[in-house]
Amino acid sequence: MWGFLLCHLVALAGKCPGLNPKKTYEYKYEGMVNIGRGMPNLAESGVRLMCKVKIIGVSAQTFLLRVSNLNFEEFNGIPGKNTFDASPKLTKRIAAGLRKPFMFEYAKGRVGDIRTSAEISDTIVNIVRGILGFFQVTVKTTQRVYELEEFGIHGLCQSTYANVEDANSQELSVTQIVDINNCKKKAAIYRGMALAVDNKLSKERGDSVISTVRYVYTVKPTVDGGLIKKAHALERQHFSPFNVKGGNSKLQAMKELVLLSVTDTVVTPAVGPMISRGNLVYKFVKVLAQIPILMKKLDDPVPKIADMIKRLAQANIYQTDSATSEDVVVLFQLLRVTSLENHEVLWKQLSGNDEHRRWLLDTIVEVADARVLKFLKNRFKAGDVSANEAGQTLLIAFNHLAAETDLMEMAKEFLSMPFSKSHPMLWNTVVLSYGSLVYRYCTYEYGTSCPVAVVQPLLDLVIDGLKRNSELDMVLALKAIGNAGHPSSIKTIRRFLPGVSAAPVTLPPRVLSAAVQSLRHLAVRDPHSVQDITVSLFVQRHLPTEIRMLACMILFETKPPLALVSTVTAFLLEEADMHVASFSYSLIGSIAKSSTPDNHFLSTACNVAVKILAPKFGRVSYHYSKAMHLDWFNDDFLIGTATEIFMLKNAASYIPTEIVTKGKFHFIGKILQLVELGFRADGIKELFRQNIQVFNGHLSYSDFKAIFKVLQDWQTLPEDKPLLSAYTQIFGQEFFFADLNKDLIRSVIKTVSPSAGKESPVWKMIENLQKGMSWHWTKPFLMFETRYIQATSLGLPLEISKYYNTVTTITVNAKAAISPPLTNRLGQLLTSDVSLVTDGFAGFSKDQFVFHGINTDIFQCGAELKSKTVVAMPWEFSMKMNVKKNTFEIDLPPCKKETKLFSVKFDVYAVSRNIEEPSLAKMTPMMPDSIEIVKFDIYHPQVKVCAEANIYGAAFCIESEATRSHYIDEYPLYYFLGYTNFAYTIQPVQSNKSVDKIHIEMNASPTKYPVSVRHLLDTLRRLSKDATKSFHLSSGSSSSRMSHQASFKAKEAWNVNPEPLFTIKALAMSGNTKPEGYEAAAYYTPAAQTDNAQLIVSQVGEEANWKLCTDANVDKMHLRWGAECQSYEMSMKTATTHLPGSKPTLKAKIHWKTVSGYMTEVGKSIEKYIPGMAFLLGFYQKHDTNSKHEVSASVVAATAGSIAMKIKLPDVVTQADSSSCSRFTLHAWTKQQHTAYNPPLFSRPFPETFSPTSPRSSTHP
């Protein structure tokens, strides 16, 4: 029989099961998916769909599919303890769609075009694709094991087949494994992380998502071909926000098809008009419209949006309402299903109210498609938004916009709209934001083959600026081109680079710098071209020093190979410019110590380079230009950070030409540049080059005096030369840059000058403040929305999404009184009594969600992490001050209610939602409180610690609670899965007396005594001269007496009991009774040898005698406290020595006579950890009998790059000499390379001592 089948199938490779067009096949189908951690007694969620499927032949290659007896069920609970629950309403809705006929083409084991009636939703069609997926199978009867690349519901993926024939039944068992991690055309969407750079080396260390699919078929031979009697599919996906190997959330999808009967087709059912819905590959249509963390009915959205905006604006009118901050995500969802016409209706309704207007503009940007661009275009044409409103809205809209071809053409129009150029900052925002949009478009749609048309407007802008010799226009366009990172822009960028351009280049340094830095994204997209350019710039010694250093910086961002690093190294050995040499060497040395995956090979090359360069540049002075790179990376978490600081100087000035700082975040195979700040000081550098005379670079008093004198000549600069320029990049995209020029400085000086009168804007502000003013600002902002959606074998979309939404609120109410009132100039404020009464609020509520599960427009199920972080800083106080008298007073109301200043709360849930019953959504904590968990460790610490200030009637408290389930093989995931609550609060407590208010007073002493260092030195010098003169007037036996008198006069000049430099009082006021609290006074007493500073803190009250007395000078400090400073005493002394023939040494000693019992207990607790920490840090120890009341340490500079340390404790001496002290190597621009001990971030689970107040169910191993 099987031989007959083989003949019938022509016995050729690739012949697969078929269907008889004259038959009707009836199957039973069941599909089920569940999501959870796959651990006992932990909550999971899922759905199950069961039905009967009939496949009816229509023609030789056309078949009709009909579904009947559908049942849809939901699961939410503990496997084994809870069961699937029927969902009648959702069953009815799904059945209504599946009841309609589906036509599909089928031949030789291949499912072709699928057709349905037009009203069938994409969700229903994809479920049918999941059923038909069983029929897409390739059987090669001439091979037992074979591999194919073929289309399926997951896309074009690699499949591995294995065939086994049952000799008895002559049935063939076919096993198919689909590698959906290795698909050329994968049915998946990734949105929200275009600005993060992929890193393959990090992927090799681990991944956050792993998926597998297995099909098993039982094929029976028939005259019509292979008949599928039974088929089973199992799909598993493991997801973790860290390395998937260290614990994960698991999705398991199963489906089964069982043949019930085969009959002759009597009558082919009639069908109506149908449209093509594509082939078997899963189709994503409007899938991004449904946010996975909520399920709401979205009909009639306009009144819902208007009502929600009004409600949210009112709820956050004074302070952030954390209870409603999650509703902002619902508002985003409603706006995404609203038409442009309705957006305009909402604008007309809400734009008249400042609060409602701001909320609409801040949230409509999350529509993220053509509608928001058309809405903004209407606003720009009508001019009914301010430049500030337009800039904020467009910036977020462009950066959150779906990067699609038609939207790029629409976005391009903003570059030519007159309103875009109505304000300089708005124009900068439009140009830079368009560059960012180009970058994301090329990332998602094309990669390195992105069409040049999208970046052409920016290329035209920069060429136009070059023709007009407009420095500002060239810089702006080059920065936008840098944002775009388009490979086709390299040709244009070359025209701005000397030695690289075909024509001579004579451009300002600022333009050259912008041109070099515009290569930053191309360093990743086209590293070879960027390497050619930057090396060419670097080796041209006649170029400005700054340009060569920037070229070196960009070169190493391309991750050059060993050969290129060797070339740079050889060139540096002949380098004469010490700034270029120092910068390059310090950059190479920093990278050599890198531990992040992206620098895995580069760090090795740099390590070799450092060994070659160290003899020449290992001791270069810190005065020269420097680069620093610091990073760490953890393989368990697949997370790391990197910080870079670049300081660029040149020989003409001590002032840095440019300072750049960068911060990067490494996570699960991607690198995201968080923040970059850059400063240029062209104008300031020019001032110092022309005017500075006495400057040695040691930051001495003479240096500061010279700097101050030079800065006073800022008006000598050219009008077009900014003193300072600054820029900011977020996620690698520059969105802001500004210049501090002469016009701005003049404006500021004129506005705040003491001689300014009523024409000053400050005068108007003061008048408003005297009348009473209120200012309020609220900003809802979706900080990020990242979504990864892929098909499952069931035809349901699996989604991994992260949302981070924030609502920030600032409110200020204030009223001032000035006595005597101002009459004609602002300077009168300096001699007036000013009082202010104010209250307000500053804070935010941040909601973060992570979803892993199934997300459709009709139902959702999955695991969801929900987190809320709240910061609340309310205030209410009255203030009085007088600048001339150096007095400052604040009165605070007493604490009457508990206030949470900071709180974090999160938990992980098994969630189930459906559109038919949105109010009945289920969110079961993954670790329910109601169950007994006995098979693994439960960790449930609860801590509350308060620091009470009974005098003031307030306490500062820290509360924390956590619930964790410990599976050792799930490290580190279980650190984060479970309930967590942390809060920092201020609470009222019983006070010693009823507190009416808390009074804080600060007073500085009058100018009777010199305060500044210069005056102190001048006075000491004068007194010394007087004493010397008196001494020389003496003679014979009276010399000693006269000397003593001179010394006495010098001290008397400062007064035996000097007044304090300043005093601070913090008192609790209660009616007419004596206030209680504390008072601090600081004294400064200059002496001939050393200057002493004293601080005395005293308790204020009827019988209070507690004091703390501190006496300190350059090398020692004496501390006494207790009753009249007599109860406890300790001192600390430091000294440095460097005698001829000896090594530099630093010594420190702490000595105590008596300390409090609390300090003794703390010291003993710390002492227990010293041996272990000493061992980890490379110390060896020995027992010795030392002073019982003393701890001492000495540090000796053993070599140029290492130190030896010795610590003496009462019973132990720990020591690390230079040969074993690599842990204490100095890394301040030195050449030595050492491997420091880096213990794992978390080498074991939570320690048992974390919460001594909470019992544990079992002891953790």
Image (spheres, rainbow, N blue to C red):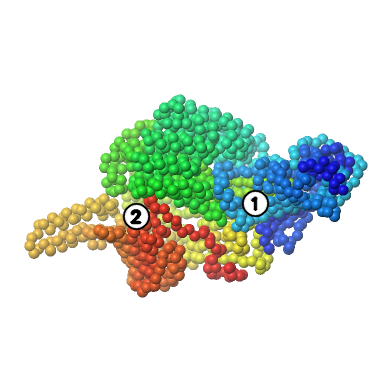
Say if 630 sits above or below 120 in the image. Answer: below
Say if 15 sits above or below 173 in the image. Answer: above
Residue type at mark 2: give it: Ala
Which one is in front, 909 or 814?
909
Residue type at mark 1: give it: Ile
Q: Is residue 383 left or right of residue 581?
A: right
Which one is in front, 710 or 483?
483
Say if 255 sits above or below 1092 in the image. Answer: above
Which one is in front, 768 or 251?
251
Q: Is residue 322 visible?
A: no
Q: Could you give the CA–CA distance between mark 2 and mark 1, rounded to whole angstroms?
A: 50 Å
Which labelled disc corresponds to residue 1200?
2
Image quadrant where residue 290 sits: top right
Q: Is residue 589 visible?
A: yes
Upstream in sequence: badge 2 or badge 1: 1
Residue at the image point whose x is 21% and y is 60% from the top: 1051
Q: Is residue 868 left or right of residue 768?
A: right
Residue 71 location in percent, x, y? 80, 52
Residue at the image point whose x is 38% and y is 65% from the top: 1215
For label 1, the residue is: 210
Which labelled disc corresponds to residue 931?
none
Mark 1, other Cα within 10 Å: few <14 / some 14–19 / many ≥20: some
Which one is in front, 75 or 956?
75
Element type at marker 1? strand
Residue 779 location in percent, x, y? 55, 45
Residue at the image point whose x is 60% and y is 36% from the top: 446
Q: How many marks?
A: 2
